[in-house]
Amino acid sequence: MKTNQFFFAAFCMFLLGSFTQVKAQKMNFWKGGAPGQESNWNCPKNWSAYQVPDAFQNVIVPNVSSGSGVYPTIDIDGMEVNALVLESGATLTITKKGALEVITTFDEFGSSEKDVNGTLYVPSMLYSGDLKMQGYADITALCSK
């Protein structure tokens, strides 16, 4: 009897631990403009969810020209997001030291711009080196894989 109770308790603890590990994709919008960290991707105050995006978040960089007027800059390696959307008029900068991996989808609309001097990994594509990409046509033309 005690053996069954032990296994039941262990099974319940396993399930509880498994459920707390599961994360749903959340939306996180760039706001920018945090004092002293205005364009820092890694500053939680620059994001709508007040946390730096991770592999479980869908990120949207909107046109903030009428808001903070500041767009994100990634200057460290190892950043990951589930999905990335650059809205028309938005800009994303990745410095030489920076890298961003987009796991599932990367979309941009209108005249969004990417200034990539580091590395941008997107599904089925890799960009690296000193590239300045603007618009979807340039992305597909500059695809190295």
Image: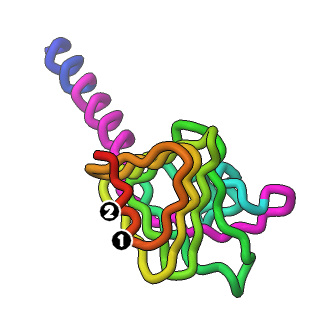
Does residue 96 appear in this view? yes
Mark 2: few/some/many CA within 10 Å (<14, 14-19, 20+): few
Determine the residue positioned at 71% across, 82% down.
Answer: 67
Which portion, as a residue range, is magenta?
Answer: 10-37
Q: Position of residue 96 (x, y in %)?
A: 62, 42
Q: Name the one closer to the observer, 65 or 5.
A: 65
Amino acid type, residue under disc 1 in the picture: Ala
Q: Position of residue 109 (x, y in %)?
A: 42, 79
Whether the magenta-drawn stretch holds residue 58 is answered as no
Side (left or right) of 129 relative to 76: left
Query: Disc 2, disc 1: CB below 8 Å?
Result: yes
Determine the residue positioned at 38% across, 54% down.
Answer: 82
Please tell me how many numbered marks the rendered image carries.
2
Q: According to the image, label 2 marks what residue?
A: 140
Q: Position of residue 42 (x, y in %)?
A: 66, 49
Amino acid type, residue under disc 2 in the picture: Thr
Give the label on residue 137, or none. 1
Seen as rendered, the residue at the extreme top is 3
